Image: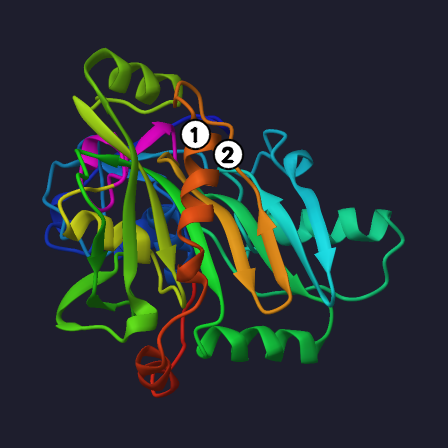
Amino acid sequence: MSAPGQVRHVTVEAAQHGERLDRVLMAVCGLSLRAARRRIDDGGIRVDGKTAVAAQRLRAGQRLELFPDGEADDGLSSAVRLLGRQGDHVAFFKPAGLHSSPLAGRTAPNLEDAARALWNEDAQTAPLHFLQRLDQATSGIVCAALSDDAARRFRAAEARGECAKYYLALLRGELEAPLTADRALDVDSRSVSRILDKMAPPLRHTRFFPLHVLRGDEAAAAQTANGLTAPAPAVTLAACVIRCGARHQIRAHAASLGLPLCGDGRYARPGDAVAGPGRERFLLHHACLTGPGWRWLCLPTWERLPFLENHFRKWLESHSRYDTISLTEKAVAARAPVRERV
């Protein structure tokens, strides 16, 4: 048996041939189905050295690597900070590697607990109603409302297309001109969002804008300095704009355009999914959130990405028109249900 904190190795037995990974993990680790799928989604399980999905069918003799479940804080909770209050809404910074919300049956550190502790330390009494979630590997702005009414107003503004969420991403490959990913996503009960062959409502589109392309040694240095493996020969620092996000929307849409996030093994390169045991690693940061009555800006501190702040600020100023959408889009948006959000 492996000691706590060590990687556990398991060989798939003949009796388990053809079984789903999540079902085998339940038997091997004594986990619930939900907990088993979460371990897989977190990147904590590898099959023959590669990341996997819950529905993967196993073969006898395959080797499973079970990484520690990442309960240690690693100092991430202390990196959470309050970005400010604007009316009845507040925003917090979430570092990469920290879960957004508490996980059922686990005591893993998360943004919501850290933010509430920070809020209470400041003698604030208004409750926090969190309005967004970011993937564990994604950093940046997470907004919270200070009342039920403020939460409803945020959702209503979102549904009207009056909120804009600006991200920075490092894409694998060269984005030469702005592109819009407009395909609908299947996110129901899925650990990996699937691109559908139909148009999504305008509020579900993702717009990509190139800010800076890096090639050769410059590209390799930027990737390795930020903990990414197998550097691509060319990468693009891009701005991404969404309105009402779905699960993994930017990640899935970027991959569908042939420009996946560097290191995002779940959607593009299984061998490059993590920088360390059990943790995904890619560069995606929620840098700016705008809406009626609020605007927050929080830039990342990525290494070896030249002029990142100037590029993004200048782009944001020149693309302020994307803070509103056309009446036609609003009419379509009014008919579009808002379910899961990034």
Q: Is residue 307 visible?
A: yes
Residue furthest to the right in view is 123
Question: Can you say which quadrant of the picture contains the N terminus?
Answer: top left
Q: Earlier in the sequence, mark 1 or mark 2?
A: 2
SS under mark 2 = loop
> Left or right: where does residue 336 sit relative to residue 186?
right
**Image location of residue 195, percent across then percent down:** 17, 63
Residue furthest to the front in view is 318
* Residue segment shown in magenta: 261-278
**Image location of residue 129, percent across then percent down:** 66, 67
Question: Can you say which quadrant of the picture contains the C terminus?
Answer: bottom left
SS under mark 1 = helix
**Image location of residue 273, percent across then percent down:** 28, 35
Which residue type carries mark 1? Leu
Disc 2 crowd rating (10 Å Cα; few below 14, some 14-19, many 20+) is some
User: Which one is nearer the viewer's eye here, 161 or 67?
Assistant: 161
Question: Residue 275: within the magenta?
Answer: yes
Q: Which residue is mark 2?
A: 300
User: Which one is nearer the viewer's eye here, 135 or 46?
Assistant: 135
Do tag 1 and tag 2 residues touch (Cβ < 8 Å)? yes
Q: Which residue is mark 1?
A: 308
